[in-house]
């Protein structure tokens, strides 16, 4: 699914939305298209809209407060993987290297759920399947597998920056 970066009137990154939602913000007059995909278009009976890569909210649009606090961990792993730079926090292999080896990234609970751990930012880490299986139902210390970084709670801003790297850097 393609995502579009949303920036404020003052050019600060706010978050991401689907391309379809970005088009809707534009059509509703809530946003302007700052950068568009060079060839992709959305067509209706009355208009043709270029697929936005970056939209800037108009001055009168209120920003949801959730953008300024802790990011949601959510049921999927996208935010977790973005926080950890899409690499295993046990062996350090990146997502591309893990996929080439025929595996995928997974969510690991530092303190396993079966041992009282929670599904919260400070207790989850990105792990490749081999490391997750090797660690099994143990803590990193018990498995002799120290984490390369301490799990922490990111802000929504940090995830925008992680997800949109070079584009977000233009606005920081």
Image (cartoon, rainbow, N blue to C red):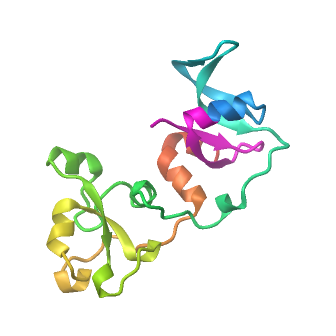
Say which quadrant the N terminus sits in. top left
Nearer to us in this view, 78 or 14: 78
The stretch in magenta equals 1-21
| Residue at x-position 79% and y-position 50% | 62
Residue 156 quadrant:
bottom right
Residue 78 quadrant:
bottom left
Residue 23 quadrant:
top right
Q: Position of residue 2 (x, y in %)?
A: 48, 35
Q: Position of residue 126 (x, y in %)?
A: 33, 63
Nearer to us in this view, 7 or 20: 20
| Residue at x-position 28% and y-position 83% | 114
| Residue at x-position 31% and y-position 57% | 87
Using residue 116 as the reference point, say whether residue 38 is left or right of it.
Answer: right
Q: Position of residue 65 (x, y in %)?
A: 72, 61
Q: Is residue 111 visible to the viewer in this orientation of the structure? A: no
| Residue at x-position 65% and y-position 58% | 67
Task: Check the image and name the residue furthest to the front.
Answer: 45
Whether the magenta-drawn stretch holds residue 20 is answered as yes
């Amino acid at each position: 699914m393609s995502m579009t970066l949303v920036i404020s009137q003052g050019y600060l990154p706010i978050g991401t939305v689907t391309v379809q939602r970005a088009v809707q913000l534009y059509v509703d007059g809530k946003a302007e298209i700052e950068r568009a995909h060079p060839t992709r278009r959305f067509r209706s009976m009355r208009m043709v809209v270029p697929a936005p890569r970056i939209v800037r909210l108009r001055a009168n649009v209120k920003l949801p407060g959730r953008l300024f606090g802790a990011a949601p961990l959510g049921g999927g792993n996208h935010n977790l993987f973005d926080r950890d730079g899409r690499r295993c926090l046990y062996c350090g292999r990146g997502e591309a290297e893990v996929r080439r080896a025929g595996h995928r990234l997974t969510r690991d609970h530092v303190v396993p759920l079966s041992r009282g751990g929670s599904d919260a930012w400070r207790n989850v880490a990105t792990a490749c399947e081999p490391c997750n299986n090797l660690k099994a139902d143990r803590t990193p210390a018990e498995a002799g597998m120290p984490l390369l970084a301490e799990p922490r709670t990111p802000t929504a801003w940090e995830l925008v920056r992680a997800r949109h790297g070079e584009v977000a850097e233009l606005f920081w």
